[in-house]
Amino acid sequence: MKLNRIIISGGGTGGHIFPAVAIADEIKRRNPEAEILFIGAEGKMEMEKVPAAGYSIIGLPIAGFQRKLTFSNFLLPFKILKSMSKARRILKEFNPEAVVGVGGYASGPTLKAATWQKIPTLVQEQNSYPGKTNILLSKSVNVLCTSYEGLEKFFPAQKIRMTGNPVRKEMVEIEGKRQEALEYYKLDPAKQTVLIIGGSLGARTLNRSVVAQIKAISENTDVQILWQSGKLYFDQLQTELKNILPSNLRLVQFIDRMDLAYAAADVIISRAGAISVSELCLIGKPVILVPSPNVAEDHQTKNAMALVQQNAAMLVKDVDSETELITEVFGLVKDIEKRLDLSTQIRKLGKPNATADIVNELEKIVK
């Protein structure tokens, strides 16, 4: 089935943008002449990231509801109406064969306008607990591509397709890269390697958990830690740890080769964003998840529990992390049987063909 003109809408975070770009890349791989237009939210990161990936994007003047009382909340109804009007105009001018929504502020007005105009629509839901926008849209869109079981509680069961989340292939291709990885990050091949990742901006709790246990880390000399602090915290941590950073703790601001970091790791500590979890399922290494409590509907905890209930990951609560995380890490490093079991179970949850399966569903609704 040939796809010619597709709109993809959503963004706000990398967890929405990267799946969107992955879907666009798969469409272009199958249909090199296809025209793909993104619709995002003005001022959000998709307005920068999408053009960097080689695609055109138009912004809507949409914003989210602020939990505290602000003047922007009074303007929200007007922004929604203006965004709806602009989305309808874009759809009429571009005349797409289908519209894909990946979550984020812009996807609501765009998908709603598309359903009003009887354009085929597909929603890609990354999380185990969907956002309110996608729950509302589910009544009118054609297909919902999901990554977790049990979403019949939120979506019409007959519309659900269990595809998994699209991930960037270059992130998860780690076969045969361990030696290169150890050399790239200047790690000792004789030691077990723990990877701590908190996202590009960093995760304050993960960083404080490491700082709180610096002495214990320095004493466990048979283990080395590759610690990505994020750009918000790197300078402060460098200053704070200037004279006490142990030789087995490698502090970096940003991991520019995530595939090599994954390849080097024997154990991984991570937040539980949907795309991170999907990548970890494909990597197949033992994982300790520390869900962020600062997200809507506490969906990171729900993402993590979906793995924990399958014995596919361990969980440390954010509130307990400073006292428990590093102890759990060292315990897991020493427990070879537990690590093998976690690796086996998490691999079973990986969906390596997710992007292709989503585009297959897109082709079906266009046909």
Image (cartoon, rainbow, N blue to C red):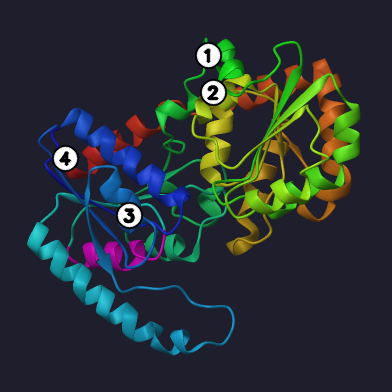
Indicate which disc, 2 or 1, sits on the residue closer to the N terminus.
1
Residue annotated with mark 2: 260
Main SS category, magenta section: helix
Residue annotated with mark 3: 48
Indicate which disc, 3 or 2, sits on the residue closer to the N terminus.
3
Image coords of residue 273 (percent x, y)? 57, 47
At a point 14% along the width and 70% down the height, the residue shown is 89
Looking at the rendering, in which quadrant would you find the N terminus? top left
Mark 2 and mark 1 in contact? Answer it, CB < 8 Å: yes
Indicate which disc, 2 or 4, sits on the residue closer to the N terminus.
2
Indicate which disc, 1 or 3, sits on the residue closer to the N terminus.
3
Residue annotated with mark 4: 367
Name the secondary structure under disc 4.
Answer: loop
Mark pair 1, 3: CA separation: 31 Å
Q: Residue furthest front?
A: 243
Provide the residue span drawn in magenta: 104-117
Q: Amino acid at mark 2?
A: Leu
Residue 89 to residue 97: above or below: below
Name the secondary structure under disc 3.
Answer: helix
- Specify the label residue 177 is tagged with: 1
Name the secondary structure under disc 2.
Answer: helix
At a point 31% along the width and 58% down the height, the residue shown is 47
